[in-house]
Amino acid sequence: MSKIFILGLVLSSFLYSTLLFSQDEHGHKEGAHEEVGKTDTHDDHGDEKEHEEDDHSDKNEHGEHDDLGDGKGEHNEENKVHLSDAQQLAAGIVVSTLTAQNIASEISVPGEIRLNSYATSRVTPRIEAQVLQRNAKMGDHVSKGQSLVALSSVSVAETQGDLLIAGTEWQRVRKLGRKVVSEKRYLEAKIAYQQAQAKLVAYGLTEAQIKKLLNQSDISQANGRFELLATQDGTVINDDFILGQMVEAGEVLFEITNESKLWIEALVKPQQMSAIKIGATARIKAGDIWLDGKVIQVHHELDEVTRTLAVRLEIDNPDDNLHPGQFVTVQIQLDDLSQQALVLPQDAVMRSADGDWQVFVEEEPGEYEPREIEIVRKFLGQVVIEGLAPGVRVVTSGAFFVQSELAKSGFAVHNH
């Protein structure tokens, strides 16, 4: 009986231990499941947060998505100009298709501005004389017939006296007539009078000055004083003399030129001369200014120092910006149309805000976008460009209006 009791106690203890171990293992498994659940829940929230951040990153400051993938975002739209039909008509917008054209090649050579000898004159005395009075100075604009300087000459004084005497004698003989005086006396009086006049003309006096002297009939007026007059309209560019100076016959007292048209002497290599023709157009760069000119003469004698030939060009100078002695760059068009290039009117090219050259390309009717280009060279109001492909539609007239509208739209966008 006692054995049975002991065996029962052992079995009871074993069952109780098994039950405790089973409950403890079950608790641990539930705890693990709870931790796993918590971890999964946290990760789910993190994923949701990342999705929210991605969604926000795709939006701009206004809460709108930027269309970055197709290149049509807000920035590109700001850089375009939309014009109505009425605006285009009022502004005279003309759009042309860019095509390669045959253009004349050109050479660039140094040049120097010279006086136009055909529009320049020098005022000189024809006899030895003394300077009494200056009536014009360097830089003055003078008119033809204007008094420039008063001179005095002994020879002129003698001839003036001879003219007064001869004039009086001739008047008396002429009144008497051929019937009263001999033929010899009549001819001698007439010839003496004419010779005295001719001498004064040879000395530089004008017919008006001689007539004035004869009308006065006063021997005291035969003082040798006479005036040199301007022979053309123009500007005095040289007057190298002083009062009281004795000047020789032929000595230059004044040099006058009309600077509205000037010459340019360009130095060209002999092998290039065959392609330069009289009348060829040219562009002249003086400082930052470009001016148009043309070839009027070609020299046929080499310069001994530079071994070049001189080409003479004529250029208009209406604003008196150019002056003789000034060095310039000359670009002369050659008689060659073998080159092809993209050409636009000069007014079609504008400066962008950052200083680059640009044109306006038509994306769609009424929609224009600026495109940067490079200017290769300019000629006759046109420009040779690079940076665009043939076939592009470009605004060739009214580009300034398009640029103004672009500037206004950009201001409005950045100041809303």
Image (cartoon, rainbow, N blue to C red):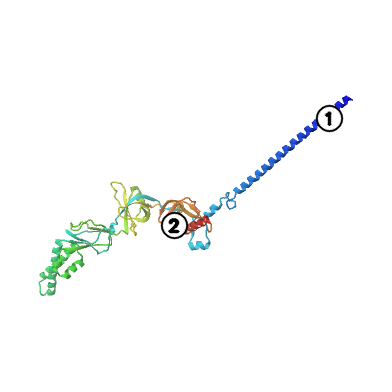
The label nearer to you, 1 versus 2, is 1
Camera-side residue: 194 or 129? Answer: 129
Count of labels in the image: 2
> SS at mark 1?
helix
In the visual, does 2 lie left or right of 29?
Answer: right
Q: Residue furthest right?
A: 1
User: What amino acid is at disc 1?
Assistant: Ser
Is residue 228 visible to us here? yes
User: What amino acid is at disc 2?
Assistant: Asp
Q: Separation of disc 1 and disc 2 at Cα?
A: 112 Å
Q: Position of residue 112 (x, y in %)?
A: 32, 52
- Residue that numbered label 1 is attached to: 12
> SS at mark 2?
helix
Camera-side residue: 289 or 410? Answer: 410
Quadrant where the N terminus sits is: top right
Q: Position of residue 121 (x, y in %)?
A: 25, 59
In the visual, does 308 lie left or right of 224?
Answer: right
Is residue 96 visible to us here? no
Could you say which disc has been placed on residue 390 in the image? none
Could you say which disc has been placed on residue 347 in the image? 2
Q: Residue at x 34, y 47 (%)?
A: 271
Q: Position of residue 247 (x, y in %)?
A: 18, 57
Q: Residue at x 79, y 33 (%)?
A: 20
Q: Residue furthest top?
A: 3
